[in-house]
Image (tube, rainbow, N blue to C red):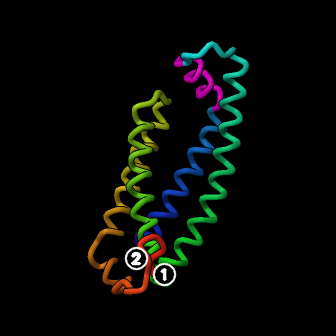
Amino acid sequence: MSAASVLLVVNLALSILVTVLSLTHIDSLIRVTLAHQHSAASPGSARQTVRNSLYVRAAVNVAVGVFYVFLITRLRRRKWWAWRRMVWISFAGSLGIIYLLTRPHTPVFKVEQVVQLLVLASIGACVLHPATRAFLGPRSAGGSFWRGR
């Protein structure tokens, strides 16, 4: 279970790295956005949209970090619902990264996306491993489908 927790922290670190890289390479992100813009929005509004999305990404990274700490502590307490959330994170996160790989980005972001996809797939492999399920122990009979125990 500790390997999955470490990979979860690595996933968060990669997200923070992308945010920092985005802030340092904002001009190239704006150029890519303008080059692939299909709407009638002005270049000024596209620039502002990119800047706003970076601030939103930074705020989301903070929220995700708090959630990951909460999730890791619950995994260490052997909570089945936390295990289920880890499965969802690895599955949905992998699908999200695969989608992002189809979108236009600068090469440095493509490399990071591939690394993040590998980390998310590794989280899934760790969480779905029989040893992890054995660590959690048997599910209690009284646990509901949605909350688990």
Amino acid type for the residue under numbered disc 1: Arg
Report the residue marked by disc 1. Answer: 76
- Indicate yes or no whether the magenta region holds residue 31: yes
Left or right of residue 60: residue 104: left
Give the magenta part as a residue range: 26-36
Q: Residues within 10 Å of mark 1 (few under 14, many from 20)?
A: some
Q: Quadrant of residue 20?
A: top right
The answer to whether the residues at label 1 and label 2 have Cβ atoms under 8 Å apart is: yes
Which mark is on residue 1? 2
Which mark is on residue 135? none
Q: Quadrant of residue 133?
A: bottom left
Q: Residue at x 38, y 41 (%)?
A: 98
Q: Residue at x 42, y 60 (%)?
A: 88
Residue closer to the observer: 78 or 10: 78
Residue closer to the observer: 66 or 112: 66
| Quadrant assignment for the N terminus | bottom left
